[in-house]
Image (cartoon, rainbow, N blue to C red):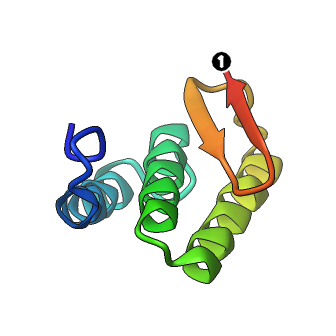
Amino acid sequence: MFRKLGMFGDAEDLMNRVLELCKEILGDRHSDTICVMNNLATTILKCGRLEEAEDLHKKVLELHKETRSWPFPCHFYHPSIEMSVS
């Protein structure tokens, strides 16, 4: 909701909290945790912090390769590539 309203700072704060909870409850490698991490990376990208967003997106993709959690209902966004995985 915050992202849709252009309130990226608020969205980032909320997603960081959700990510902390997901890691605590589900673990670092759970597909829902990875999806939240991807959404956070997209929000960071929208805030203009390209390097930070790219690093987090790379981590997300690496976790997917390691956990073989494809497919999952998450939307990937990268400055040069956009794809929907479902």
Q: Is 21 in front, or is 61? A: 61
Q: Residue at x 56, y 23 (%)?
A: 73
Q: Is 54 in front, or is 7? A: 7
Res. 63 image quadrant: bottom right
Q: Residue type at mark 1? A: Ser
Left or right: 8 as drawn, with respect to 34: left
The C terminus is located in which quarter?
Answer: top right
What residue sits right under mark 1 in the picture? 86
Q: Residue at x 29, y 46 (%)?
A: 3
Q: Residues within 10 Å of mark 1 (few under 14, many from 20)?
A: few
Which SS class for mark 1? loop
Q: Residue at x 52, y 64 (%)?
A: 45
Q: Position of residue 41 (x, y in %)?
A: 51, 61
Left or right: 80 as drawn, with respect to 17: right
Q: Position of residue 12 (x, y in %)?
A: 29, 63
Q: Position of residue 38 (x, y in %)?
A: 54, 51
- Relative height, residue 58 to residue 71 (above, below): below
Q: Position of residue 62 (x, y in %)?
A: 77, 60
